[in-house]
Structure formats: C-alpha cells, structure tokens
Amino acid sequence: MKSYATKSTHSNVKIFRCTNGADPVPMVPLWPFSHAPVDKPEFRLDSSSGVNFESHKLLSGVGYVKNLRSDSWGHLNRAAIANLNRPVRMKFHNRHQVTFSQRWSDKIASAIITLLKDAGYGALVTGQGIIVAGLTYYDLLARAMEKVAKSSQKLAEQTKGLLGHMLVFAGKVAKDVTDLSYKFIKWVFEVTVARLYRAVRQAIA
C-alpha cells in the first residue's frame, strides 16, 4: 500500500519510474496500492495515451527501445504527478467522458478517496485498522460505500457518479445505476480490476 511505497521512496534515494504513456502494465495494481517513488515525477519516453499493448514491449515499433533516444534523464519528458489528494466528485451524466487510460484510472482513484473522506471514512483511505479476516480490501470498501450511499442523497449521487465512471472504464454499458448495494458495488470493483489485468496479461504475453 502507499505506506510501503512511501517508506521505499525515503529509504532508496535513486528510485526512478520510466514508462511509455500507453503501457498498461504500470496501471496496476489499482489504488490503494501505490508504486514507489511517491509524489515524484514519472519519466515518459513518449507522449502516447490510452492503452496500447505493444507499448510494453522492448522491441516493438512503439516499444521502449525505439522510444529511448537519449541516455540523459534531462532529455526525458516528465508526466504530471497524480495528486490523489485533489478532490474529485464525479457526476453520473459525465460518465461518457471516460477513456481506458492511466489518466482516468488516477481520476477514479481520486474520486474514491474523495467520497470516503466526504463521508468520514478516513481510516479506509489511510489503510489503518482495516485488516479483517476473510475479507479483501475491496470487500471492506464496497461495504463502506453501501453505507455511504445510504447516509444521504448527496453522497448517494456521488457514489452513483463514481460507479458510472468505473463501469465505462471497465467497458460496460452504464445507462443507469439504481442498485447501490454491497453486492453491486463489489461487482463494479471486480469488473474494473479485471479489465486492467486483462490488458496487462495481453501486454506481457
């Protein structure tokens, strides 16, 4: 989780993260897990976006060897640092703006954090005191979001907007979301994570 990545960042001075923009492999694991270094720029070899399985390969036409044109860090572009502390509240009617990309993966993570903080579930954001036998983190998250949706109409709409964006990100049709139950919310997380890992498996095949 982020605490481990943060510890690694501070204990190892020279950790660099260098990627192709459309490589799906750096998109996993999904929040709340984080890569080191934390809060430091990511170097980009190209300006691509979205997902391109060939971007992960070394020797493909859009791979790492082709895009590495210099042996100097100073010649590489820096990707914007994803600020997970920036509040993001998603509206259901804006869900069609979503693309399957690192940018939207980061925005969805920010929206999850914002929803939990708005509802007073700070412990789930920090990862403190959330170990429960037999339950995954996403089980706990789905249970919390069900309670959040029931607590007020405003938070229910915020939850609906988040789930709608996640469904589009996962490649699902989201005409409407009326079920804000634990079972449905957990399923949305499952299909979202599944699409990410399918992309990764195709990239490393």
Image (cartoon, rainbow, N blue to C red):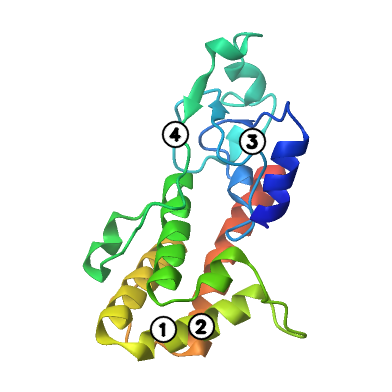
Residue topped by disc 1: 148
Q: Residues within 10 Å of mark 4 (few under 14, many from 20)?
A: few
- Inspect the image, locate mark 1, and give the three-letter code of the amino acid beneath it: Val
Q: Tag 3 or tag 1, which sits nearer the N-term?
A: 3
Of residues 183 and 5, the one drawn nearer to the viewer in this rendering = 5
Q: Is residue 13 left or right of residue 49?
A: right
| Residue 19 screen position, x and y as percent | 60, 31
The residue under the point 55% across, 22% down is: 45
Q: Which residue is mark 2?
A: 144
Q: Which mark is residue 56?
A: 3
Q: Residues within 10 Å of mark 3 (few under 14, many from 20)?
A: many
Query: Mark 1 touching mark 2, by CB under 8 A?
Result: yes
Q: Is residue 33 visible?
A: yes
The label shown at residue 190 is none
Which residue is labeled 4 in the image? Answer: 80
Marks 3 and 2 sit apart, C-alpha to C-alpha, by 35 Å
Residue 80 place in picture, x, y as percent: 44, 34
Labelled pair 1, 3 in contact (Cβ < 8 Å) = no
Q: Are marks 4 and 3 in contact (CB under 8 Å)?
A: no
